[in-house]
Amino acid sequence: MPEWLNALPKAELHLHLEGSLEPELLFALAERNQIALPWADVETLRAAYAFNNLQEFLDLYYAGANVLRTEQDFYDLTWAYLQRCKAQNVIHVEPFFDPQTHTDRGIPFEVVLRGIQQALLDGEQQLGISHGLILSFLRHLPEEEAFKTLEQAMPFRDAFIGVGLDSSEKGFPPRLFERVFAKARSEGLHAVAHAGEEGPPEYIWEALDLLKIKRIDHGVRAIEDERLMQRIIDEQIPLTVCPLSNIKLCVFEHMGQHNILEMLERGVKVTVNSDDPAYFGGYVGENFAALHQHLGMTEAQAKRLAQNSLDARLV
Ligand code: ADE
Ligand code: ZN
């Protein structure tokens, strides 16, 4: 990666902590927790990171998360991510975690939260990286389950800045979660949601109008709807775009087709993020580098993208 790209101060606003689980740490945690894995070794697992769509990735992502059992595991996961951030001059992070992925396996909510929270606090003190944690609901599960998760989270209200919506998009429109998002907002939590990754522009409208989100996660399909484009430009609603993710999950065929710079030039407040860096081939820095290499992103454009990420922080 060019040094000038690495040196740019950046914020990462779209990162699933479970998606930062590198194969090496996955194997180490499996050994520590005496869990048998279906993959022979790290190389075999990495070789399985070939996906045709979001669902194929999610199946492996949830299987990988099964090695996370103890507070120390969640601490180690988060700490490893923050070290990567430090090396790439990421100065602020607003990561997601998926409580239901863990509570559904019998891991207590507070075990997950305490491990993540302690690493974030240490990251602030030892690495100088500020943070705001976002609790994400799994949209393939009923809204009822999201309500239960929000209830479990409320004793720890101060540990979060907001709620998000992730997992399988198609067939699970934002409108299914209108009431739980209203409840979260009434508690003073910010709202964000994945929309327009695989799903149609209508899902972005719903996320804005019904969930009242502050930021759109992905949102690359907004470009198919001119009226929607005008709105996100007029209202300067940030998009947390994840270029390498979009290629790995076949949202675009290759990086040369990605629309992030076209959006930037049209005045959309787009940002660069890594989504699930352990699975998609790189962290924020590698995402910037790919735009430079394949789309001819200039230094001026990189600076605007980095500034957008700092401007689009929720805290
Ligand atoms: N969970 C982790 N990564 C995701 C993505 N890119 N889209 C939806 N849910 C996710
Ligand atoms: Zn995501």
Image (cartoon, rainbow, N blue to C red):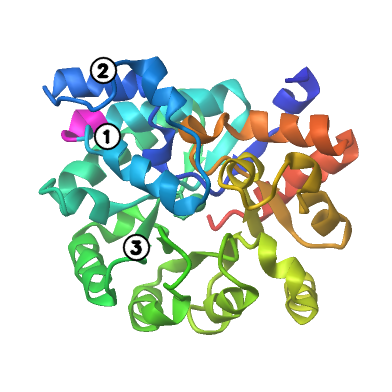
Q: Characterize the local packing of mark 2: few (<14), some (14-19) or many (20 or more) Cα atoms within 10 angstroms.
A: some
Dominant SS type (magenta): helix
Give the residue type that dot 3 points to: Phe
Does residue 40 appear to the left or right of 91 in the view shown? left
For residue 287, what is the image quadrant?
top right
Region rendered in magenta: 69-73
- 24 versus 243 height, above or below: above
Task: Name the residue beneath numbered marker 1.
Answer: 74
Q: Indicate the position of residue 85 as horizontal and vertical percent values.
A: 54, 29
The N terminus appears in which quarter of the rendering? top right
Q: Between residues 297 and 269, which one lies in front from this camera angle?
A: 297
- Can residue 237 be spotted in the picture? no
Residue type (three-letter) at the residue carrying disc 1:
Phe
Q: What residue type is labelled 2?
A: Ala
Q: Label 2 belongs to which residue?
A: 28
| Residue 221 placement (x, y as % from top left) | 68, 65
**Distance from the alpha carbon under mark 3 to that under mark 1:** 18 Å
